[in-house]
Image: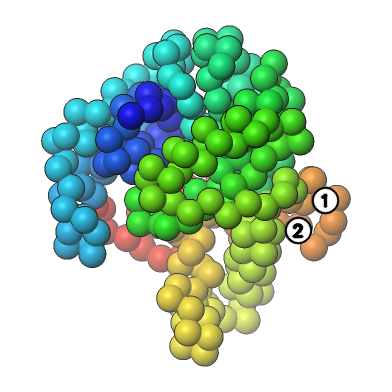
Amino acid sequence: MTNVGVVGAGVMGTGVAQDLAQHGHSVVLVDNDPDALDAALARIELECRMSRMLGGPQVDAEAVLASITTGTSLELLAETEVVIENITENWDLKSALYAQLDVVCKADTVFVANTSAIPITKIAALTSRPDKVMGVHFMNPVPMKAACEFIPGYHTSEQTKDVVRALLDSVGKKSIPVNDAPGFVSNRVLMLTVNEAAFLVHEGVADAKTVDEVFRSCFGHPMGPLETADLIGVDTILYSVEVLYEQFNDSKYRPCPLLKKMTDAGLHGRKSGKGFYVYQSMG
Ligand code: NAD
């Protein structure tokens, strides 16, 4: 059992915390928004209770919840062995957080960045322990996904890789190693696809349902790109495309204005109840 800190209790942090707790780890879940923590616990309880129905294993919801401690203070992470960071895809927020984590956590605590697009080497440089910083790009929903991208930064040590690989093994996830680059492999392709799909709607070539229908019916994809955008979070898609645009200085990553308007309007997808589609509340 590892004592793992999870920072950020949104879409990804909630899934990471649930998955770790389901596999017997002790989890400290921290978010600076107390409402996010309440929502995370409610979602974990519901997902555990529904796991069997959704084709997953039988899960003891009470035991999972008992393994998770929550709070708004980073000090709660003082005794953790590994911290998995899942806060908003925003450089200013992440850079402020890593500076604080570096102070509150033990010198040998390993930091795992679950970012969509920010280079791991750039994140590691925010700390005094770049050898103990590793990137893991988890897939959503985390407890249902069998693999993740495994991204060492320039200075990541073999020991850190071993610690993180063992943790991923313990939750049954295959680590797929890729080199550090903005967006890694998955999001270099996926974010461009989703951005371009949003342009199709923005320009009136087709509505969201039709765009997704083409991908489902013609290509046999299980989900279309705009359903995927709603699952990931429209705001997270925008921030990730902005990171790619800034990192590559290449106009092919220019963000679609529709993504900006939807983000400003609070149409963030499933997590806000409305994005390209409308959702019923899970609660
Ligand atoms: P989200 O918007 O659902 O949640 C982000 C959470 O971070 C919020 O609850 C917010 O209150 C919290 N937060 C922000 N600043 C904080 C701080 N300083 N301290 C503590 N908590 C803070 O976002 P998400 O979809 O969970 O994404 C989190 C990270 O994971 C991002 O970097 C994103 O790019 C990455 N990611 C997302 C997906 C996905 O499918 N959504 C997949 C892989 C990776």
Q: Which residue sits at x=16%, y=53%?
A: 58
Q: Give residue 7's position: percent from left, percent from top.
A: 46, 28
Q: Amino acid at mark 2?
A: Tyr
Camera-nearest residue between 39 and 63 = 63
Residue 281 bears which disc, if any? none
Position of 81 relative to 221 (above/below)? above
- Is residue 257 visible in the rendered structure shown here? no
Which amino acid lies under the numbered mark 1 shown in the image of this protein? Phe
Task: Verify CB contact (< 8 Å) between mark 2 and mark 1.
Answer: yes
Q: Position of residue 204 (x, y in %)?
A: 61, 77
Q: Is residue 43 left or right of residue 174?
A: left
For the point 79% across and 46% down, which residue is it?
247
Between 7 and 156, the one lying in front of the other is 156
Give the residue displayed 23% in from the left and 64% down from the top. 55
Quadrant location, the N terminus: top left
Q: Which mark is residue 253?
A: 2
Crowding at mark 2 (Cα within 10 Å: few <14, some 14-19, many 20+): many
Identified at 58% across, 12% down, the residue is 107
Q: Nearer the viewer, residue 207 or 7?
A: 7
Determine which of the numbered discs, if any, sits on residue 248 in the image.
Answer: 1
Residue 249 placed where, x, y %? 85, 50
Mark 1 residue's CB less than 8 Å from ligand 1: no
Q: Secondary structure at mark 1?
A: helix
How far apart are the alpha carbons under marks 2 and 1? 8 Å
Please provide percent x and percent y for residue 141: 39, 54
Nearer to us of marks 2 and 1 is 1
**Residue 171, relative to residue 194: is it above or below?**
above
